Image (cartoon, rainbow, N blue to C red):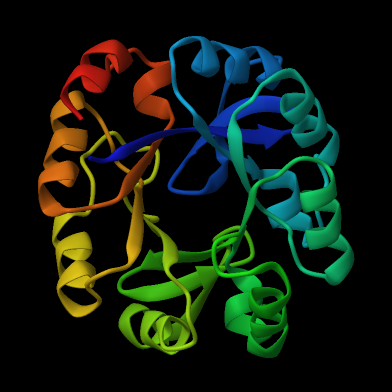
Amino acid sequence: MIRLIPAIDIIDGKCVRLTKGDYNEKTIYREDPVDAAKEFEQMGLTHLHLVDLDGAKSSHVTNIHVLREISAKTKLCIDFGGGIKSDDDIKAVFENGANMATIGSVAVKEPSLFYKWLQEYGAERIILGADIKNDNIAVNGWKEETNENIYSFLRQYINHGVRNILCTDITKDGTLSGPAYNLYEEILKRFPGINLIASGGVSSNEDIMQLDRLGVSAVVFGKAYYEHRININTLMEHV
């Protein structure tokens, strides 16, 4: 059964969505992200993907106060990503209420630091963020494309005990054009047994049900919900 994980992306303390990671293509959906989080909890959802887009861009956690407030005012299981680049960043994230941390850029740029966190906090609390464009990993708020191939990148960390992987196809994100089914199918074929979280492109209930049929563990969605293209109550009856 696929887990439903709503996303709250933060810029200037507000709940926004970007298109293909473009900071110039920003839509504000809620002035107060805490209200959005409460809304998700009232629907019966249990998890939240909270992204500090200011942090991703500036390379250090910026919107920690939003995490703290959502953690204090809901019982949601929160995974936090965006700008976690140092020991102080990840410590602050966990001390302010995150249950899990999504790490992308550090895994590419500083593998030794990622391994240290994996050992220190445990594989169950660390999510490997694999943001891709044309089968290559992108970092630093998706502004920088690397030559790191998605499959070799994943193999490296799975061999070191990583089991939670959040994979976003940047070309799909915020487009409502459907998820990258072929990509997720190939990942699961090569690495059976991982906890694969799909993100990007979700446009309908059927998209999510198709991901469920593929064997994806969880799905992150944002724009499709905020623009009333998916029905959470109906989904919860079927997945």
| Quarter residue 204 falls in | top left
The N terminus: image quadrant = top left
Q: Nearer the viewer, residue 60 or 192?
A: 192
Q: Residue 73, image x and y in percent?
A: 74, 18
Label tally: 0
Q: What residue is rendered at 45% in x and 74% in y? A: 137
**Left or right of 18 on screen, residue 179:** left
Residue 218: tell me if it is visible. yes
Picture quarter containing residue 182? bottom left
Residue visible at 15% across and 35% down? Answer: 209
Question: Eyeballing the image, is 94 above or below 70?
Answer: below
State whether residue 89 is above or below residue 120: above
Front residue of 213 and 132: 213
Residue 107 image point, x, y percent:
59, 78
**Screen quadrant of the C terminus:** top left
In front: 99, or 167?
99
| Residue 226 left/right relative to 33 | left
Rendered image quadrant of residue 109: bottom right
Residue 145: % across, % down: 50, 74
